[in-house]
């Protein structure tokens, strides 16, 4: 009769199997937690990249606008729902209703070119003339508030482009956000 190869040896005890299973479970949970956290950070980075693209897009649009029109404004704002289907813009001197399907050939701002990159948010643009520049230089501040999951980045908590008193956390009378772009625009040929 032939002896089996492992007939003399003992198998794993119940304690050893439980310890090995516990170690395996802990390592699986740690790996899944790391993966889920990584996905969250990747989504936040993509959202932030889309927000930067929107901010840059708005700056480019401002640079292409007529200086005389801009110098007549003190602010304008608009909110967007992420699809481009709901885009409303208001200004200090005029109200511009922006339908992305309409080229708005008579309006200085062409909303048809606005792409929200799937982001829900609001932009507020402050425009002021620089003292001593003979009205040839404007300071422009573009502020973007946006939503990541259920968190609003910036002071405009209802994302309507307007600052309510309860939203102004630093009491400066302006919407503030980590995503703010400051620039100057000069009249050409001065």
Image: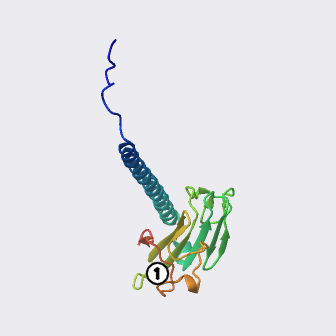
Q: Secondary structure at mark 1?
A: strand
- Give how far across and how far down residue 98 sits, in percent: 66, 65
Q: What residue does disc 1 label? A: 129
11, above or below 16, in the image: above
Q: Is residue 119 left or right of residue 40?
A: right
Looking at the rendered image, the quarter that the N terminus falls into is: top left
- Give how far across and how far down residue 22 sits, in percent: 40, 49
- Quadrant of res 147: bottom right
Q: Residue furthest front?
A: 1
190, above or below 4, in the image: below
Can residue 66 be spotted in the picture? no
- Give how far across and how far down residue 161 sits, in percent: 59, 74
Can residue 79 be spotted in the picture? yes
Residue sitting at x 62%, y 79%: 93
Q: Is residue 105 left or right of residue 118?
A: right
Looking at the rendered image, the quarter that the C terminus falls into is: bottom left
Foreground of the two, 101 or 149: 149
Residue sitting at x 66%, y 70%: 96
Display coloring: rainbow
Please count the marks in the image.
1
113, above or below 2, in the image: below
Residue sitting at x 30%, y 27%: 8
Residue sitting at x 31%, y 21%: 5
Foreground of the two, 24 or 36: 24
Q: Residues within 10 Å of mark 1 (few under 14, many from 20)?
A: many
């Amino acid at each position: 009769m032939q002896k089996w190869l492992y007939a003399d040896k003992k198998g794993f005890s119940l304690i050893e199997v439980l310890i090995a299973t516990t170690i395996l479970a802990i390592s699986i949970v740690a790996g899944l937690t790391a993966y889920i956290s990584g996905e969250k950070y990747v989504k936040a980075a993509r959202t932030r990249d889309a927000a930067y693209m929107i901010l840059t897009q708005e700056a480019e649009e401002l640079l292409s606008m007529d200086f005389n029109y801009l110098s007549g404004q003190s602010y304008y704002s608009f909110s967007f729902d992420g699809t481009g289907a709901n885009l409303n813009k208001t200004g200090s001197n005029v109200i511009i209703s922006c339908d992305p399907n309409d080229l708005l050939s008579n309006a200085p701002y062409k909303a048809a070119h606005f792409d929200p990159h799937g982001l829900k948010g609001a932009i507020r643009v402050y425009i002021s003339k620089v003292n001593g520049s003979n009205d040839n230089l404007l300071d422009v501040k573009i502020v973007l508030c946006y939503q990541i999951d259920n968190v609003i980045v910036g002071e405009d908590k209802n994302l309507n482009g307007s600052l309510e008193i309860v939203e102004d956390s630093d009491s400066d009378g302006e919407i503030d956000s980590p995503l703010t772009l400051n620039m100057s625009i000069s009249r050409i040929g001065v």
